[in-house]
Image: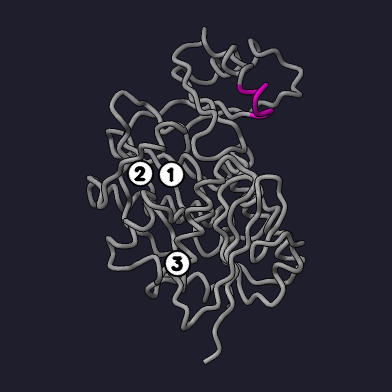
Amino acid sequence: MARTTVGIVRGGTSNEYDLSLKTGAVMLSTLPEDRYDVRDIFIDKRGFWHFRGIPSDPARALSQIDVVLSALHGGVGEDGSVHRILDRAGVAYAGSSAYASALAYHKARARDALLSYGIRMPRGMHFTLTSDMTTADMARRVFSAFGPPYILKPVAAGAGHGIVIADSIIELPDMIGDLLDAFGAIVVEEFIRGREAVVAVLENFRDEELYTLPPVRILLPPGARILGHEERAQLDYRVPGDFSHAEKQEMAILARAAHRALALSHFSRADIIITSRGVPYLLEVNTTPKLHEGAVLPAALEAVGSSVLEFLEHQIRLARA
């Protein structure tokens, strides 16, 4: 039987480069050689493509590839840029379209789309460096809509980069200014206290149109209030999480609704916080699976008797279909 030629795209220009290499390594080592001709397609930190260790243009690297699995985290791997290259090359790929990926990656635009769909999210506002407002005006506008504490996030950064908390209106103007200078555009949201969870959605899996894996409870390091970049390096989690049956159902409904609202395909991962009263709030949605050591997806798959191999083969079938 002819083997399927699978291109694993990894590396990239984002600050999640190292994690991307590790997820790609898992993909490369998991797919069995008797069924797949697996090819390593590397994008370096400057954005140059390489195939078989040799610099290459994307068209050449993607030639004779049946399907692409992306291990790119953040940046061009999730903002639609690489998806558009794959579309131009006419190569099938697992995951969402260029448009849907770009929408999900941009926190402000994704918020607008999710809220218009009726999905419960923390209250928030979006600001850019080009605004005519001063940071003091921005802070006053936020304060007039909802009280502290506030969580500030870059609109297009992953792995917890740039996330900070302002405990009062006094701190807010300087924090807004610092993040705008660093990232150009930010979202300021109300800080919801509760238990953090991750819920993955798989399309057309086990005879369900949108199958949800069990929610993974994210455990923050002692003294940490958010899962920022430093905290993610020490990520600890529990699966199955300590959630009631009703809470699990509510989170599954929320994750599936977010997947539909953003018109995502094949796979998504919803980051959720659930209050002491059992009310879930969607924080954001990610479109690229993280499979490196310590990531939550492999543990969630194992919890339902699945595996990374089954997940990858399912993604390949969806892409080729």
Secondary structure at numbered mark 2: strand
Amino acid type of disc 1?
Asp
Instruction: List the residue tagged with mark 2.
Output: 197
Amino acid type of disc 3?
Ser
Instruction: List the residue tagged with mark 3.
Output: 29
Separation of marks 1 and 3 at Cα, in angstroms:
28 Å
Q: Magenta span has 182?
A: yes
Residue drawn at point x = 55 percent, y = 73 percent: 38
Residue 295 percent location from the top left of the image: 39, 50
Amino acid type of disc 2?
Ala
Residue 152 percent location from the top left of the image: 53, 25
Please tell me which of labels 1 and 3 falls first in the chain: 3
Residue drawn at point x = 49 percent, y = 20 percent: 146
Label 2 CA crowd tier, 10 Å (few <14, some 14–19, many 20+): many
Separation of marks 3 and 2 at Cα, in angstroms:
28 Å
Please report contact status of discs 1 and 3: CB closer than 8 Å, yes or no: no
Residue 209 percent location from the top left of the image: 45, 69
Q: Magenta span has 87?
A: no
Q: In screen coordinates, is 26 left or right of 143?
A: left
For the C terminus, the image quarter is bottom right
Secondary structure at numbered mark 3: helix
Q: Residue furthest top?
A: 170
Label 1 CA crowd tier, 10 Å (few <14, some 14–19, many 20+): many
Please report contact status of discs 2 and 1: CB closer than 8 Å, yes or no: yes
Residue drawn at point x = 47 percent, y = 25 percent: 190
Residue 223: image tag = none
Residue drawn at point x = 57 percent, y = 19 percent: 142
309 is higher (above) or lower (below) than 217: below
Question: Which numbered mark, 3 or 2, is in the foreground of this view?
Answer: 3
104 is higher (above) or lower (below) than 306: above
Magenta-colored span: 179-185
